[in-house]
Amino acid sequence: MSEVKKIQKFILMRLKNKIKLLISMALIYLPLIAFGHNFDSEDALPNENSSNVESWNIDAQFTHTTQWHPTFDTKCDANQFYCMSGRAQRKQTNDATIYFGARLWSDAELYINTEVDEGFGLGDTHGIAGFSSGESYKLGKPYPYIRTQRFFIRQTINLGGEDQHLDSLANQLAGNRQSDNLILTVGKFSLVDIFDSNTYSHDPRNDFLNWSIVDAGAFDYAGDAWGYVYGVAGELNKGEWSFRGALVNLSTEPGAVHTDMTFNQWSTVGEVEKRYVYEGHEGKIKVLGFLNHGRMADYRDALALGGVPDLSLVRHETSKIGIAINLEQSISSNVGLFARFSVNDGKKETWDFTDINKSFSVGASFKGEIWGRTLDKVGLALANNDLSDAAKDFFEKGGMGVLIGEGPHLRYSSERIMEAYYSIHMKDWCNVTVDYQYIQNPAYNPQNQDISIFGVRVHFAI
């Protein structure tokens, strides 16, 4: 095949994929445009005395993220290993979601989220433990595909306290509840919908992008290749305290497409939250613990085989534990601070999140009212990620993890990340974000040159 024909074939393939994406987006957005912004029903159910109680609603979002890095020096061959190519590259992702919610009976709701995804992260989402885009999944495709990412029922049991009104949002029907309550969730959802949340850093569609900044890096939370699981979760809110717990299934193997529907491999998570007011400003502290149980490998067992260690050869039934501490503190109406620290036992392989055994992140968020752009937002954060001694030895011998694996190398150093973003409010339904990340020792390998990653994100929500 001549070079001209190859180029023509490539252009036609890219054009065909873009047309598929536009058709998929049209299927989601045209009904909303035809019938008006934010489908909702404010018809009260029987025995409800508020006209602001919805029976159902529909919301939608679309997010485009492009990231680019210039050429940098690396000894790793990206064709053979899980590493970032040293050649300059640009990758993009697109996702469109339709959120449907319906009230089943008093204080019980059904939510279904259908999503169209397309694209790849840099390095096909490999080569950095604290990966650069929370909009990139472990599995990318060059064409649009549709998945139902969430399908769950939420039941609220009121236990007293002050009356609260809930606004109509994605995955939240407008309604009323009491401040003291028990919330039960059953079905398909993401653990980080419920756990490890943070006002200033938890939403890669609206704030930071880096995995180890939007979540606790060493929280190896259960999830398929897109981060979703089946299970049950409960949240008890009482005064200034919240207590959360969940039992969910793990994926069938590390980073797999499917989760274990037999629940022979499972994860349990618990979290305690304390809300407080300091010097007139609100703050929160959360302490989280998790235990993953399944057929997973010990790094030392793999190393004992000699040669290049292979985790798949030594998997056996065992458990992995970890903890995470999450802080957020309002400094003023326009400034907030956050920090996370997390660590896991480091003996067992990473299963569903990323190759980090200890992580610390800290950052700040600033609202644009300070400089006369009320709805703009700026964020700045730092993260430091580390491996356990066993994991260091494993990767230095050439082992392959979930996101990293650079072949045999003799040096190790902490992976350090700086991220800054500016989110520009364009319309009530649109914001555009410019993002910059500087990553030192990507994949813990100081033989890799530091990487600068530039990003642009466009987010629509209606």
Image (cartoon, helix red, strand yellow):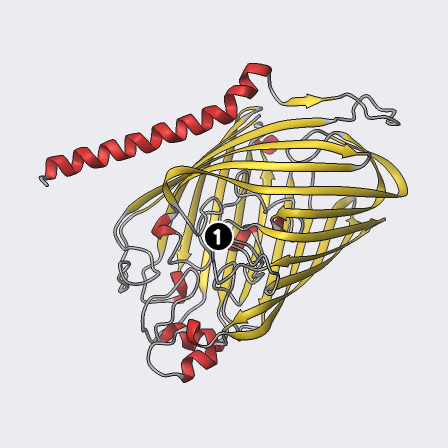
Q: Position of residue 106 (x, y in %)?
A: 82, 34
**Horizontal side of residue 34 vs 171, given as left or right:** left
The percent coordinates of residue 416 (x first, y second) are 45, 60
Q: On screen, 447 above or below 64? A: below
Residue found at the very far right of the displayed protein: 160
Q: Residue at x 60, y 19 (%)?
A: 37
**x, y (%) of residue 348?**
52, 73
Quarter-of-image position of residue 39: top right
Regarding residue 193, the answer to whether it shows in the image is: no
Number of numbered tags placed on the structure image: 1
Give the secondary structure at mark 1: loop
Name the spot of residue 83 as percent of width and height, x first. 34, 59
Q: Residue at x 43, y 73 (%)?
A: 311
Residue positioned 47% across, 81% down in the render = 300
User: Residue most toward the front?
Assistant: 262
Toward the viewer: 366 or 93? 93
Residue closer to the observer: 262 or 434:
262
The quadrant of the picture occupied by the C terminus is top right
Of the residues shown, which amino acid type is indicated by label 1?
Ala
| Residue holding disc 1 | 225
In the shown orientation, is residue 70 left or right of residue 281? left
- Give the position of the N terminus as an image quadrant: top left
The reply, left or right, for residue 197 in relation to residue 402 is right
State which quadrant residue 451 falls in: bottom left
Camera-side residue of 101 and 409: 101
Crowding near the residue tagged with mark 1, few <14, some 14–19, many ≥20 C-alpha atoms within 10 Å: many
- Is residue 61 at all visible to an observer of this figure? yes
The residue sitting at the left extreme is 2
